[in-house]
Amino acid sequence: MKVTFFMKGKPVAKERPRFAAGRVYTPARTLHFEEDVANEFLDAAKFNNGLYEGPVSVAITVYHKVPASWPKWKRREALMGKLHVTSRPDLDNVLKSVMDGLSGVAYKSDKQVDYISASREYSIEWGLTVTVEVEE
């Protein structure tokens, strides 16, 4: 079984926990992004109730908007896949936000994830594609 969804907008990298008044909390921006990931998964997985119990594979592609300040030739090269993304947000931190957003919704715990594929590429707009797959 496979569930794939696309999210528009700039992905949010997992931020470091904050400390205030003797307690630890996750910044609101990260929490909102993780909630959005969970909701997008649930919308895409209408045909089942999610929460896979076996091994799960997760594939993520982060689409970075090509900077408007770049010359036309460089924009064209980026959109053709000839340039690699080396800017923020960091791929590993976006991956962590997505994985935390899926945890408890797509699978019980991220310890079930036995394969991860993550990449970044340039696009006309910011976005994110996520595929969660489990063998039946």
Image (spheres, grey):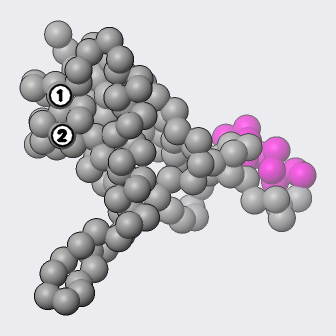
Determine which quarter of the picture holds residue 47.
Answer: top left
Q: Residue furthest right?
A: 72
Q: Compared with residue 16, is residue 34 higher up or lower down, i.e. above or below?
A: above
Marks 1,2: beta carbons within 8 A: yes
Residue to which mark 1 is pinned = 51
Mark 1 crowd level (few <14, some 14–19, many ≥20, 10 Å Cα): some
Determine which quarter of the picture holds residue 39.
Answer: top left
Q: Quadrant of the C terminus?
A: top left
Does 25 sit left or right of 77 as displayed?
A: left
Q: Compared with residue 1, is residue 12 higher up or lower down, i.e. above or below?
A: below
Q: Residue furthest bottom?
A: 21
Q: Is residue 118 or residue 89 the one in the foreground? A: 89
As measured in the structure, the alpha-carbon distance from the residue carrying label 1 to the one carrying label 2 is: 7 Å
What residue is rendered at 35% in x and 59% in y?
Answer: 31
Q: Given the image, on which type of amino acid does mark 1 rest?
A: Leu
Percent x, y for residue 10? 57, 53
What residue is rendered at 47% in x and 44% in y?
Answer: 119
Percent x, y for residue 83? 67, 50
Percent x, y for residue 41? 37, 31
Q: Which residues are magenta?
A: 72-83
Q: Report helix, strand or loop for mark 2.
A: loop
Label total for image:
2
Q: Compared with residue 132, is residue 88 higher up or lower down, i.e. above or below?
A: below
Residue to which mark 2 is pinned = 104
Q: Compared with residue 53, is residue 119 higher up or lower down, i.e. above or below?
A: below
Q: Given the image, on which type of amino acid does mark 2 rest?
A: Gly
Q: Residue furthest front?
A: 21
Q: Report helix, strand or loop for mark 1.
A: loop
Does 53 sit left or right of 31 as displayed?
A: left
Mark 2 crowd level (few <14, some 14–19, many ≥20, 10 Å Cα): some
Does 97 sit left or right of 70 as displayed?
A: left
- Please indicate, yes or no, whether residue 125 appears anywhere in the rendered image: yes
